[in-house]
Amino acid sequence: MGIEEVMVWIWLGVFVISIVIEALEPGLISIWFAGGAILALILSIIPGVPFGLKLLFLLLLQLL
């Protein structure tokens, strides 16, 4: 199992944790992390996409 396959699970974990936090404290704060994690998860499925680009999408969604 390579790092690309592991990153899919890590981004899925970030998504789930963000949704749980949002359910416990509904202030639309962590929902943006969930959206960014989904984008990073989709990018993780595509082979060859660098980690920096995935992280950039996660952080850019926080600025919206």
Image (cartoon, rainbow, N blue to C red):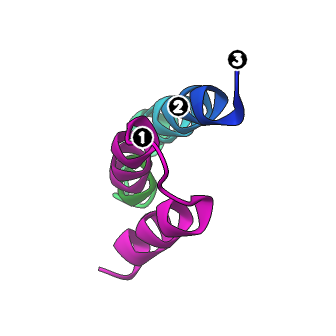
Q: Among all residues in the image, which is located at the extreme top?
A: 1
Q: Amino acid at mark 3?
A: Met
Position of 32 compared to 1: left or right?
Answer: left
| SS at circle 1 | helix
For marks 1 and 2, give the CA distance: 6 Å
Q: Horizontal and vertical percent for residue 13? A: 57, 30
**43 drawn magenta:** yes
Q: Residues within 10 Å of mark 2 (few under 14, many from 20)?
A: some
Q: Amino acid at mark 2?
A: Val
Range shown magenta: 35-64
The quadrant in which the C terminus is found is bottom left
Q: Nearer the viewer, residue 30 or 49?
A: 49
| Total numbered badges shown on the rendered structure | 3
Q: Residue at horizontal 59%, vertical 26%?
A: 5
For marks 2 and 3, give the CA distance: 11 Å
Secondary structure mostly seen in magenta is helix
Q: Residue at horizontal 57%, vertical 26%?
A: 9
**59 drawn magenta:** yes
Q: Amino acid at mark 1?
A: Leu
Q: Residue at horizontal 49%, vertical 30%?
A: 12
Determine which residue is flagged by label 2.
8
| SS at circle 3 | loop
Q: Nearer the viewer's eye, disc 1 or disc 3?
A: 3
Determine which residue is flagged by label 1.
41
**Quarter occupied by residue 51:** bottom right
Q: Earlier in the sequence, mark 1 or mark 2?
A: 2
Determine which residue is flagged by label 3.
1
Residue 29 vertical placement versus 10 (above, below)? below
